[in-house]
Every structure is written in C-alpha cells, then in structure tokens.
Amino acid sequence: MGPLDNMPGRDIRLDACRGIALWFVFINHIPGNVCSWLTLSHYGFSDTTEVFMFVSGLTCTMAYGHVFRSAGTWATICHTVRRSWEIYAAFLLLTVLLVVAVHWMDVELADDANVAIVLQQPGEALSRAAILQYRPVNTDVLPTFVLFHLLFAPLLLLLLRCPNATLAASALLYGLVQIYGWNLRGWPTNDWYFNPLAWQFLVTLGGWWVVVGRWRLMPLVTSRPVIMLSAAYLIWSLAVTMSWINPALELAVPRFLKGLIYPIDKSDLDPLRLLHFLALAVCVTNLVPAHWAALRSRVLLGAVRCGENSLEVYCVGVLLSLAAYIVLRTVSDGVLAQVVVSATGIALLTVFATLLTWFTDLAAPRVRLL
C-alpha cells in the first residue's frame, strides 16, 4: 500500500488555523495597531508566516495527491500551474489596486506602501512586478507562493517516490542558505523578503509529514518528553521576546546568549523561528483534536471559511488594512478606534469569505461559457 492510498482528506483544523492566521495578518498589517498584541508576533520568534507555509505544504500535498491518484501526472501539473497563475494574477491585480488606492486616498503613504517607485517609474516598476522582482508592502509572500505552486508537481513526485531523500535535500538547501545567504534578486532592493530558497523547507516538511511523517513521528509528537520540551522552548522564546520591550527583562538575557541568537532573521527563516513554529505545532496538535466541537462554532466557522478562501481573503485583507490605516490617521488613532477598526475588518473578511463560499457552491457544477 503506497502513500497515495492513505492520503488524508481535508482537515478542518488546517482551514481554521489558516483563517485565524489571516485575521492575524490583517491586524498586523495595520501599523501601530494595539490589537497586534492578540496575535502570535509578540509572543515568540515565529508568526503567522510559518503557519501559512507549513499548512500550504500539508494542503497542497493532500489536494494535489488526490489529483495525482485519480488523474495522473499531467493533470497534477496542470492543476499546480493553474493555481500558480491564479496567485500571479492576484499579485499583479493587488499591486495595481494598491497603487490606485494610495494615489486616490492618501498619496503621502506612497513611501510607507512602497508604491512611490511606481508613481515615479511606472514602466520600470510594473515590468519588475511582472517578473516578481518588485513588490508593494504586504504583498511579499505572494511571489513566493507563485514559485512554490509552480514547482509543486515535481516536488510531489519526489516526495511520493523518495520522501526522506527529498526532505534531506530540502534541509540541505535550507542549511546552505543559512551559511551563505543565498537569495533571489529583487528590485529596487537586492533580495526577496521571503526567501523561497529558505522557506521551501517548511513547505517540503508539510508535504513530507502528509506522505510519511505522520505515521512515523506521531507517537513521538504526542509523547510527554517532546510536549514538555516544546512547552519549555515556547516559554523561553516568550521570555526573550518580552525582553525586547521590557528593559528589566532585557538585562536578564546574558550577553553571550545575545551574541548566539541575534539577529533572528525572518527573511531566511532563522532556525530559532523554525524551532519555535515546530514547538508550537506540537502543542497545538496535542491540544486541539481533529473533531473538536468548537471547530464547528459560529466564530471558528468564520475562520474556516476564511481559510478555505485564503488567497482572496489575503488580498482583500491587504487592501482593508491600508484603508484601516488611513481611517486611523484621518479620524482617530486611539485604542478604541483601533479595536473597532480591527474588529470591523475581521468581520468584513469573514462575511466576504462566507459569501465567496456560497457563490462557489452555487456555481458548481461549472458551465462552460462561449
């Protein structure tokens, strides 16, 4: 019996995690938002980006694995290329919409939104965006996903045929990036913010987990020693991150330790960030069962709907976060205003995702138009 015979179905926990991550992303994209203290970013080394990458590896392997089993290699390639094209088109459209929004609503935000270069050199900037070298603020993750989906079919084939060797090769590339700082060329700066040569490891790890890892490592993941070590690492990470804002706690971090762990680089997925995410994943796996009743609650069902429509919700969230920032700059940036704007944005994203799911269900089966 091969790995395709045991390919799991869609896990509602993954959609819920991705939906909550999208809410957190929206909140964190609003500069100076007090509600960001409700997200992961202040309580450890990793944040929602690690969640997105790993969950994408899981869901892509499950979805494309079923396609590969039922329709074969070429159908899988067509599906991955089409999804890559959808993300690419969404990125270009979002880039144009951000430029238009800043130009119409508040041109003073051009530098903050990284669209001033488009207003100054539109031809060059849009040409660079077309080849994924230029990215406005908060869109950096989309080009990385364009590449991942474009190359996922060969990755899936390698995972199905030699999963351990594929994971080892991915880990080797990740390690070399940490040593030599390899990255892809960007514009007008030199590097991609989310280095695909480093972040590919989390995607590959997610795929490997679906193919063989869940069978081999689940007893280890659910063992008491691993849970205790993971919890201890999360607590230590929390203490270190709190030292960044509390001078008293900063003094408690030895100088030699600072020299060892800093800088904790997000662009290249620093090993401390990777370990923090893995520890967090271990704890969540043990605390949230697959059939947890709360996943069907009204609040978490909204997160599930957002997770099911992650690309569309992410793009709308980027535009909403810009609008929210402009509202706070124009009307009030008080704590109450930040809470109201954040809650309103999350509600709008949830309604949008719910309507999108409803429209998708109505449109099925699809009718070919002339």
Image (cartoon, rainbow, N blue to C red):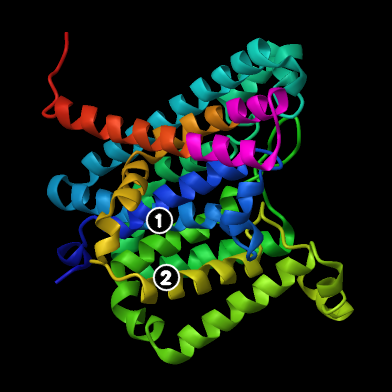
SS assignment at label 1 = helix
Residue 323 magenta-highlighted: yes
Q: Which residues are magenta?
A: 322-344
**Pointer 1 or 2: first along the chain:** 1
Residue 220: x and y in percent read 39, 85
Task: List the single residue furthest toward the front.
Answer: 336
**Picture layout, residue 46 above or below residue 74:** below
Residue 82: x and y in percent read 33, 32
Going by the image, does 269 lie left or right of 89?
right
User: Badge 1 is on which residue?
Assistant: 17
Going by the image, does 30 lie left or right of 297?
right
Graded by Cα atoms within 10 Å as few (under 14), some (14 to 19) or many (20 or more), the crowding at tag 1 reads: many
Residue 21: x and y in percent read 47, 50
Q: Are marks 1 and 2 in contact (CB under 8 Å)?
A: yes
The amino acid type found where label 2 is placed reads Val
Q: Which residue is more in the foreground, 80 or 272?
A: 272
Of the 4 image quadrants, the one containing the C terminus is: top left
Going by the image, does 19 lie left or right of 242?
left
Identify the residue at horizontal 86%, vertical 68% (top origin).
Answer: 247
Residue 55: x and y in percent read 40, 56
Graded by Cα atoms within 10 Å as few (under 14), some (14 to 19) or many (20 or more), the crowding at tag 2 reads: few
User: Badge 2 is on which residue?
Assistant: 284
Identify the residue at horizontal 40%, vertical 56% (top origin).
Answer: 17
Mark 1 and mark 2: span between their CA atoms?
A: 10 Å
Task: Tell me where residue 45 sits by quadrant.
Answer: bottom right
Task: Tell me where residue 268 sits by quadrant.
Answer: bottom right
> Can residue 211 be seen from the camera position used here?
yes
Identify the residue at horizontal 50%, vertical 63% (top origin).
Answer: 170
**Picture layout, residue 367 above or below residue 253:** above
